[in-house]
Image: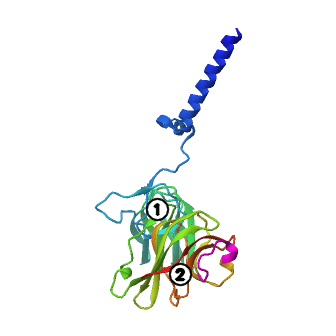
Amino acid sequence: MSRIVSGAGRGLGLLLLVASLVVAGDLFGTRAALFGSATASPRPAAASRDGTFRPVDTSKPPTTTVLRSQPWWQTVRAFAGRGPMLLPGVRLSPSAIQVRVRWSCRRGRLRIRSAARSAPLVDGSCGGAKTKTTLVAARNLGRLRVAAVGPWTARVDQQVDVPLVEPPLRAMRTKGARVIASGSFYRIDQFTQGRVTVYRLSGHRYALRLSGFYVTPNSDLQLRLSGVRAPGSTREYLSAPSTFAAPLDVTAGTMNVVLPKGTHVDRARSLVVWCAGTRSAYAAATLKAAR
C-alpha cells in the first residue's frame, strides 16, 4: 500500500513539475491564458507632436513597440473663430488616455459640445486662457458645435503614453548645420538606453536628437547640460553647475529637442536626465566631440 501511495505521490509531483514548466515557459500561451500578460500589447509609435500617428516612412508599415512613455500631451486640432460655429470632426488616437481643451474668449461665455458626449467639452465664462481636462469617453468626438458671442480659440490635445518617433528636423539637414558631439546614455539611478547627437544649427542655435531612447518614466524630468564628464552618481552630478536644456515630457522614442536661445554647449561635457522632484540623476551621456 505504501508503495502505491509513494508511486502516486511521485506521479503527482512529476505532473505538477511539468505543469509548472509549461506555465512558466508560457508554452502554447498557457500563462497568458490563465493569468493574463504582464507585457503591454504592441502599439504604433507617434510620428509627431501634432496628432499624426502615421509612420515616418509611409512606404513601410508602422513600427509597433511594447515600450511605454511617461504620458504626454499631443496636439490634435487647433481652432479659432468668431461667434457660433460648427467645427470639423475630431478623432482621437486609440492610445488616448485623456482629452484636454485649452481655450480662450474675450466676452460672454464659450460652450463647445461634442456629439459623442452628453456633457460639454467646454462651458465657461470668458476672460483669459483656460484649460479643461477629462478622461476619454469616446475615440471619435465627431463634429464640435461652438456657442460664443465674440472671438475665441480652442486647442484639443490628447494624452498618450506611446513613444515618439520623429524624423530629423529640416534644420539639421540644411547647409551650415553640423554635428558637434554625441554620446550614449548610461544608468545612474534609473534604467536608460539610447544615444544623443548634438547639432549646431544655423543662426547660433543648438538642437539635440535622442535616438532609440528610453529612460524610466516620471513626470518631472529634465535634460541638463553638465560640466562633469561622466557623473556616476547624483552627488557627482551636483558637484558642478549645470544648465537647463529642456523638459523631458516624452521618455521613449527618437525625438528632437531644440535648445533655448542663448544656450551654449561648448563647455558641456555630459547630458544628464535629472528628476527635479526627487533630486535624482536618472541617467547621463558623456558628450564626445565630433571629428
Task: Please tell me in which quadrant of the rendered image residue 71 appears.
Answer: bottom right
Report the magenta residues as a range. Answer: 226-236
Residue that appears at 61% across and 27% down: 16
Which mark identifies residue 21? none
Which residue is more in the foreground, 258 or 142?
A: 258
Res. 148 visible in picture: no
Residue that numbered label 1 is attached to: 114
Compared to residue 66, the image places residue 260 above or below, namely below
Residue that appears at 39% across and 74% down: 168
Which mark identifies residue 107? 2
Amino acid type of the residue tagged 2 in the rendering: Arg
Q: Callout 2: 10 Å neighbours few (<14), some, many (20+)? A: some
- CB-based contact (under 8 Å), mark 2 and mark 1: no
The reply, left or right, for residue 242 in relation to residue 259 is: right
Amino acid type of the residue tagged 1 in the rendering: Ser
Position of residue 236 measured from the top left corner of the image (x, y, whole percent): 67, 76
Position of residue 174 measured from the top left corner of the image (x, y, whole percent): 33, 84
Q: How many marks?
A: 2
How far apart in space, not on screen, are marks 2 and 1 (Cα)?
Answer: 22 Å
Dot 1 falls on a residue whose secondary structure is strand
Query: Looking at the image, is mark 2 or mark 1 earlier in the sequence?
Result: 2
Check the picture and name the quadrant holding the N terminus: top right
